[in-house]
Amino acid sequence: MDDLIRQHILPGLKNDALDELGDSAKLDLGSGSLCFTTDSYVVKPLFFNGGDIGKLAVCGTVNDLAVAGSKPVALALSLIIEDGFEIELLDKILASIGETASLIGVDIVTGDTKTVEAGAADKIFINTAGIGIRPAGVDLGFEKIAIGDKILINGTIGDHGMTIISQRQEIKFQSQLKSDCASLADLISELLESTSDIKFIRDPTRGGLASTLNEIARSTALSVEIHENDIPIKPTVQAAADMLGFDVLAIANEGKFVAVVSPESADECLRICRNHPLGKETKIIGEIVDTRDVPLVEIETRIGGKRIVQMPYGRELPRIC
Amino acid sequence: MLDRINKAQHDINVACETLGRQINIMEVCGTHTVSIFRNGIRSILPKNLKLLSGPGCPVCVTDQGYIDAVLQLADRDDCIIATYGDMIRVPGKEGSLETKQAKANVKVVLSSEDALELAKDNSAQTVVFVAVGFETTAPATAVVVKEAANGAVDNFCILSGHKLVVPAMRALLSEKNDKINAFLCPGHVSAIIGYGAFAEIVEEFDRPCVVAGFEPVQIIEGLCEICRQLLADKAELKSMYSAVVTEKGNIAAQKIIDECFEPVDGYWRGVGKIPKSTLKLKDKYSQFDAFERFGISEEPSEEIKGCRCGEVLCGLIEPPECGLFGKSCTPLEPIGPCMVSSEGACAAWFKYGREK
Amino acid sequence: MCLAIPARIVELEQDVAVVDAMGNRYKAKTTLLPEAKLGDLVLVHAGFAISLVDEEEAKKTWQLIAEIDEFDDTQNKLSG
């Protein structure tokens, strides 16, 4: 185990706090309110076009901090490794974790590694926990959302989920599908610095856009109306979803956020996002509307019809993230 | 495309207003049911035009006796069950294929060829292919039965639940169901059987039969054509899906169905016995017939108390009219088949149309 | 159940084809469509091509097919 840590885990994650190998990391956080999150990653397959479980584990947790309005400060990394898992693959994952964290500018300051007997885990499971500092003045939440607010998304939906599904062995097709796995910290930070009219941000991971919009409707008791014509979807993703009978609205994304903003600031938010590499295809997809009898998410279809977008239910796709 | 939709919508409105009475068009195919909902088509149709879902959902109309037979085979260690995903959740008397999946001898396949491959790769076990679907899917089954015969793949067999659309339409009308004014006919079944196959419905029952694809423009133009015919009081056979469908259909596919199968009387869940409506393997291929191989007979099962799937499948009621809908019968805990299948009228209604 | 999508035949050897649907490539058989040729747009259902698709006709009413030319152009620009 000591070898594993010193020769494989530490080298890629170099930083002062971690090198101490203490039981806890000590951090000086300054002022502002603290945001704290954790997530576990069990994605299958481990490596996919556009990323891997390591990159996902870093970006996923960083994004959870970012959508809360905070700047990521530090991550904890916990690995559970199945006995017999190839060391070369582990090295690849660790390198990916190190590289991703480095690019984002966040340190992995503490961690834990366990190995379990063959069969007790499926190759590798990763948990990351993260802390971030939310600057004073940043105030996001369901309670801020009001009728008339615009809803925007920073690009195409369904990319991550369809990539994972297409690379599962049973499906057997080659594709240009690519996961959108990426850190949104930078882009969200820019948005929040430019305007205080951002009411709410969330990343539509499991359950996709449909899930996030329904959560908004449920928690605000207001309704949501979106326009099919304005929802960006790559033709490759749509065709793959059509082939397998999936609804793109309910498919996971790992490099997208949904933002609810005041109508006056919508155009400015659009401009800021489109100027950023991760937001070139940002679109305003709908708005918050008054509720008739029950809070609903409705979509105006391409042909001008209307129908409900339900909270995704039923057997969720396993191990998408 | 929006222009075409607007025009068709306008023409539908004018026709329905002129007709004045309630118009009921049955869309036979489950894929049409879903597309109509997904595109919000009902919301742009006039009030007196109603779309009825029909029995065109192969999972919905598969009798419980068939499911129970599959589940029994799944319990055997010497069998591997290969099935399309749609059938996984259909409940039998004791669980479903999904609950049996933990046993690892239930495999979801995307093609009948995958099922045959499974047989070739697992010579110690018998692969039973759950062959459900209408004429769109039957040729794919026939191809692999022939391949199995030619390649002497003895550990492969099929449990045929393939059903035919035209006999079902005929049966609905013969019940003196005068609620149905016209049919929107299934696009992909027609690609196989040809739109000419619906001529007998037009001639014998004087109902417009219009074949449409599954894109919203295609569906709306199909509905528009039906309204035009109803207004002219002249039932005709027409295809609005010329990009894919011809009058004679896919002859090679029809030939192979004919070579391997023969139509026999069959039980359609909720609808009852329909003459010459189910495909059974011909004697020549009986060794690949799982019913024969395992000595199974498909007994029609009793209906579940309170479940009105039968009436839904015949277009007599809409799902919300069933007392169980949305209460004890939901997609997560379905009671009847119309709620289990992703193309079932009840499931579609629940997902796209229901306000909580 | 009648899920069938249009795809172009990009490889064909006897009755085994590779088809491309907006960049997704997978195997399909042309056993039921002996007249299918390389380059044809076909309707694929459950792993089999079941019908030829008249591309010009389809473009008028089929959203994804209407986008085919634009998609192909983008592909060519990326690889060219």
Image: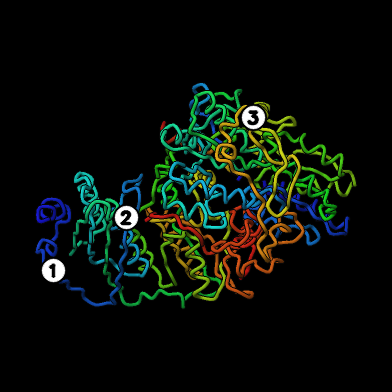
Instruction: Return the chain for callout 3.
Output: B
Q: In this rendering, is residue A202 above or below A182?
A: below
**Residue closest to the eye, B73 or B309:** B73
> Distance between the Cα atoms at labels 2 and 1?
25 Å
Q: Are marks 3 and 1 on the same chain?
A: no
Return the x and y of residue A52 as percentages of the image width and height: 31, 49
Disc 2 is placed on an element classified as helix
Name the amino acid type tagged 2.
Answer: Leu
Q: Residues within 10 Å of mark 2 (few under 14, many from 20)?
A: many
Residue A319 location in percent, x, y? 38, 55
Report the residue at 75% width, 57% height from top: B45
Quarter occupied by the N terminus of chain C: top right
Q: Chain of mark 2?
A: A
**For discs 2 and 1, the disc positioned in front in the rendered view:** 1
Q: Residue at x 68, y 27 (%)?
A: B251
Residue at image mark 1: A23
**Do the residues at pointers 2 and 3 share their chain?**
no
Q: How many marks?
A: 3
What distance separates the C-alpha of mark 3 from that of mark 1?
74 Å
Q: Are callouts 2 and 1 both on one chain?
A: yes
The circle on residue A56 is 2
Residue A31, quarter of the rendered image = bottom left
Q: Position of residue A110 (x, y in %)?
A: 18, 64
Could you say which disc has been placed on residue B283 in the image? 3
Can you tell which of label 2 and label 3 is closer to the viewer? Answer: 3
Q: Nearer the viewer, residue C33 or A207?
A: C33
